[in-house]
Image: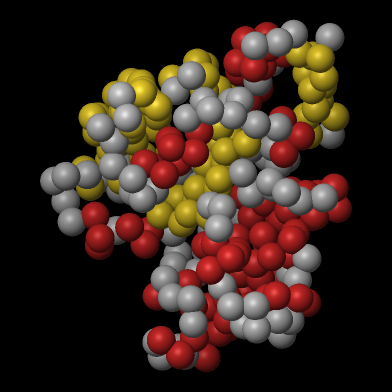
């Protein structure tokens, strides 16, 4: 691995109940890149992300995180350096919690503030992350009273609390209405333009959910990497059509994307 490589998967495969979920996946993210992973349902995107975040072990292949190889290093010591936001996190959190406590408790991977001792600096840090994502006005709001979009941005701020070296997002805009989605896209664009922010890898199956400023794209199909490269060179109507199995036309406007069947 080169010094600037944050995360590397080499020939990673996953088999479940005799079915190949992932087959020979190769992927590398460097500290100056932000990736979107595109593909239809069932293409292996979420399994890919769960393996990359070490929530799941592959059947074969090599995973290297910050110079540490899975199976040869104590990954517990670096797991907190991988920020992961997936489905179901919101349901684990008590609705009465203040939004700032939802963010702050991620310092120890906790769900309640009384499980650990926090400093005023921890609280200030949580508020700073919320301000960065444009939700500073939610600091004293109860988590259960937030909209779906506000909850998702609060969970995103939570994932930054442990100072991760890479941030993995599994369909963060799923289930959001149009205003909620656009607020999240704005927050993600602001985040990746922050010089102190970690690289981001985001899974989606909608090109409309690619925030402005992402640099690279990986197309996944049937558990394999179909195409990968810079968005400028790789995100095309041809690749999109091949990946999703239908004739699609891709449009770009002001750094955002849309697609429709033709």
Residue 117: image location, x then y, percent: 41, 90
On screen, residue 30 versus residue 78, left or right, reads right
Quick one: 13 or 182, which is closer to the camera?
13
Q: Is residue 25 above or below residue 261?
A: below
Q: Is residue 180 or residue 235 the one in the foreground?
A: 180
Q: Quadrant of the C terminus?
A: top right
Q: Which residue ends up furthest to the front in the rendered image?
A: 17
> In the rendered image, which quarter contains the N terminus?
top left
- Which quadrant holds residue 180? bottom right
Residue 200 visible here: no
- Residue at coordinates 43% horizontally, 75% vertically from top-left? 110
Q: How is the image coloured?
A: secondary structure
Q: Is residue 124 above or below residue 228?
A: below
Q: Compared to 18, does 209 lie above or below?
A: below
Extreme residue toward the left, this view: 72
Name the residue located 46 percent from the left edge and 56 percent from the top edge: 83
Q: Residue 240 appears in which quarter of the rendering?
A: top right
Q: Residue at position x 36%, y 50% from top?
A: 55
Q: Which is nearer the eye, 90 or 162?
A: 90
Please indicate whether residue 226 sits to the left or right of residue 26 in the image.
right
Judging depth in this view, the residue of 116 and 92 nearest the camera is 92
Provide residue 14's location: percent of width, then percent of height.
Answer: 32, 30
x 75%, y 71%: residue: 146
- Give the total of numbered labels: 0
Asked whether residue 143 appears in the rendered view, the answer is yes
Q: Position of residue 50 (x, y in %)?
A: 41, 44
How far across and down, in percent of the image, does residue 260 sit?
A: 82, 19
């Amino acid at each position: 691995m080169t010094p600037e490589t944050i995360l590397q998967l080499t020939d990673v495969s996953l088999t479940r109940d005799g079915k190949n979920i992932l087959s020979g996946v190769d992927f590398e993210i460097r500290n100056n890149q932000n990736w979107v992973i595109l593909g239809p349902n069932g293409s292996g995107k979420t399994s890919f992300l769960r393996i990359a975040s070490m929530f799941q072990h592959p059947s074969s292949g090599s995973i290297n995180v910050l110079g540490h190889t899975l199976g040869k290093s104590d990954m517990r010591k670096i797991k907190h350096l991988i920020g992961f936001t997936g489905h179901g996190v919101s349901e684990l959190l008590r609705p009465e919690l203040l939004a700032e406590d939802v963010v702050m408790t991620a310092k120890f991977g906790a769900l309640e503030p009384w499980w650990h001792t926090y400093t005023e600096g921890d609280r200030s840090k949580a508020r700073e992350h919320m301000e960065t994502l444009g939700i500073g006005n939610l600091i004293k709001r109860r988590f259960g009273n937030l909209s779906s979009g506000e909850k998702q941005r609060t969970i995103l701020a939570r994932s930054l609390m442990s100072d991760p070296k890479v941030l993995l997002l599994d369909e963060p805009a799923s289930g959001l209405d149009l205003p909620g989605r656009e607020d999240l896209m704005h927050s993600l664009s602001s985040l990746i333009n922050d010089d102190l922010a970690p690289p981001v890898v985001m899974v989606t199956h909608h090109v409309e959910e690619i925030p402005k400023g992402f640099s690279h794209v990986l197309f996944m199909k049937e558990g394999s990497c179909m195409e990968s490269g810079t968005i400028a060179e790789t995100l095309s109507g041809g690749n999109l059509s091949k990946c999703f199995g239908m004739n699609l036309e891709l449009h770009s406007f002001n750094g955002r994307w849309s697609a429709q069947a033709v």
